[in-house]
Image (cartoon, rainbow, N blue to C red):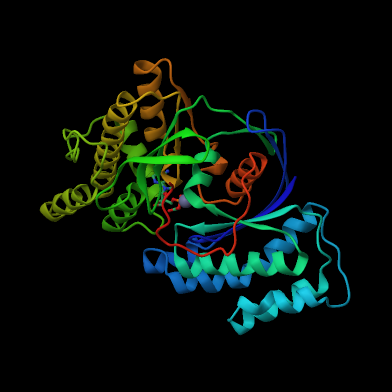
Amino acid sequence: MKILAIETSCDETAVVVLEGEGDIKKASFKILGNALLSQADLHAPFGGVYPNLAKREHQTNLVPLTAQALTDAGLYETEEGITPSQEEALSDVRDVAFKTSIRDFIYATKAPEVDMIAVTHGPGLEPALWTGINFAVALGKAWNIPVMGIDHMEGHIVSALLEPDGKNFTLRAPKLPLLALLISGGHTEFVAMDEWFVYERIGETKDDAVGEAFDKVARLLNLAYPGGPQVAALAARSRIRGKNEIIFPRPMATDATCDFSFSGLKTAVMYKLQKMDKIGEEDKEHIAHAFEDAVRDVLIIKTRRALASRDIGSFVIGGGVSANDIIRRGLVDLVQNEFTDIEVHLPDKSLTGDNAIMIAAAAYLRASSGKKPHAPIFASGSLRLS
Ligand code: KG4
Ligand code: ZN
């Protein structure tokens, strides 16, 4: 089954053509085409993602990226002539320039041999999500291909189960029940999956997400957006030096829930900076180090509690912050030392950030287990796995 997948929930425009084979226990995925453009540099001056700029960039980039992914997959053929379904297809697209660009594309492109189009329908920035959805639905109508909406967080769970094999992937079929710790710019939550695609949330942040805390601390340290990788790089330099006297609190570490709170940690960093008269490069490195340690420890403490609270076969982490080496190592050590019966799966570094491979793979797994696309597809900024 060939799937064209589109991800526009935040500041990455990503389009993939993926060919899936096999059932949910033994699936493999060939990446036939993969085109991704990050807008991070454009948003950097705003210190975060600016929704209308993200939307405009997605509108500009979706057609060329889709053409590129289809070309790489050997599925792009030009065609003259307009069919009635192509005329009808544009009815939901309101932005004039975007509509023109989609019209030019579908009028000149032969329906590719793709079995399904998958598109992220939430959670994320609604203007950004709608851009991807309107585009996917227009292509689906014009080419008569079913369109499936996929939850971005389900994509992050699936990303942890993809074992790289050259530029392709095979599914590491997890032992169920699975527990996922999702840590991204907008989310921090524990989600249990007792059977495929049936979710139960067992803990979540009461305020900031982990990625958001990294980004806010980065701003306090005068680092550009997205700050997570830069804070981690600063912390690494302090770790090499070995000694660090700064200690930040571990918020909510002793309460009995699997919930989190990270806004106080960011405030603790702010107070620390306010108390220092002169802030040199080394001070910043120590602060980043102490902050990263505090985040890692809270994640470990809460994961220990979550894993002990119910019967779990495998533990996965997903989301942008799962790129963090200190957090990865801390969580893997926890499971390997204290929960020896539980499998642990981490996403390949190429899949930790937002991408369309995870959306395509999730759509394949849903379709191959008999789930049907349901229309109409709505963007939901606050979509929750259930
Ligand atoms: O999943 P993602 O790419 O986008 C959302 O769905 O939110 O996550 C982005 C978040 C940003 O907050 C970014 O700073 C953080 O992931 N991040 C990191 C690292 N790489 C990305 N945080 C800590 N350490 C990293 N190495
Ligand atoms: Zn994400």
- Taking the image as shown, residue 164 lies to the left or right of residue 125, namely right
Q: Position of residue 171 (x, y in %)?
A: 62, 32
Q: What residue sits 18% from the left and 49% below the top?
A: 264
Q: Position of residue 6 (x, y in %)?
A: 62, 58
Q: Between residue 195 and residue 117, name the one nearer to us.
A: 195
Instruction: Answer above or below: position of 291 versus 63.
Output: above
Q: Position of residue 67 (x, y in %)?
A: 74, 63
Q: Between residue 104 and residue 306, name the one nearer to us.
A: 306
Q: Residue furthest left?
A: 275
Q: Position of residue 308 (x, y in %)?
A: 31, 23
Can the viewer see residue 98?
yes
Can the viewer see residue 34?
no
Q: What residue sits 50% from the left and 61% below the top?
A: 11
- Taking the image as shown, residue 273 lies to the left or right of residue 315, namely left
- Taking the image as shown, residue 215 lies to the left or right of residue 19, namely left
Q: Determine which quarter of the picture holds residue 28.
A: top right
- Taking the image as shown, residue 286 lies to the left or right of residue 16, namely left
Instruction: Answer above or below: position of 290 versus 89.
Output: above
